[in-house]
Image: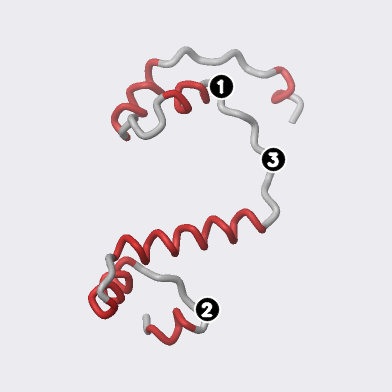
Amino acid sequence: MTLSRVLNGKAGISAAMAIRLAVALGTTPELWMNMQSQYDLWRARQARQPAVRRFAHADFFKKRAGKATGAALTRFLRTAPKAAPDPKDAMR
């Protein structure tokens, strides 16, 4: 990927490009990756989103945001009580 493609909006900033930009401009790679992430989120929010039902155990994640690791999430999903099936799902 070339800088020209990034500047012309034809490509996003990859991790490798973020490192090169950081070295060339005296910043950090995290700065460039965060800007790319913010741009990606902005674009996604502009697009039409499908309807999503709230996860039955969403409060668990809200209370522990930033604390749960992948392993903790896996353990939780294995041990969490199963939600009763929604009768409406059978009709879909």
Circle 3 SS class = loop
Q: CA distance from mark 1 to mark 2?
A: 39 Å
* Viewer-nearest of discs 1 and 2: 2
Q: CA distance from mark 3 to mark 1?
A: 16 Å
Circle 1 SS class = loop
Q: Residue at x 38, y 16 (%)?
A: 79
Mark 1 Cα within 10 Å, few/some/many (few <14, many 20+)?
few
- For the C terminus, give its image quadrant: top right
Which amino acid lies under the numbered mark 1 shown in the image of this protein? Answer: Ala
Residue at the disc numbered 2:
9
Q: What is the x, y in percent for residue 47?
A: 67, 57
Judge whether 58 appears above or below 81 on screen.
below
The quarter holding residue 23 reads bottom left
Residue at the disc numbered 3:
51
Mark 2 Cα within 10 Å, few/some/many (few <14, many 20+)?
few
Residue at the disc numbered 1:
56
Q: Residue at x 48, y 27 (%)?
A: 62
Q: Residue furthest bottom?
A: 4
Q: Earlier in the sequence, mark 3 or mark 1?
A: 3
Q: Residue at x 47, y 75 (%)?
A: 11
Q: Residue furthest right?
A: 91
- For the N terminus, give its image quadrant: bottom left
The quarter holding residue 22 reads bottom left
Q: What is the x, y in percent for residue 2?
A: 37, 84
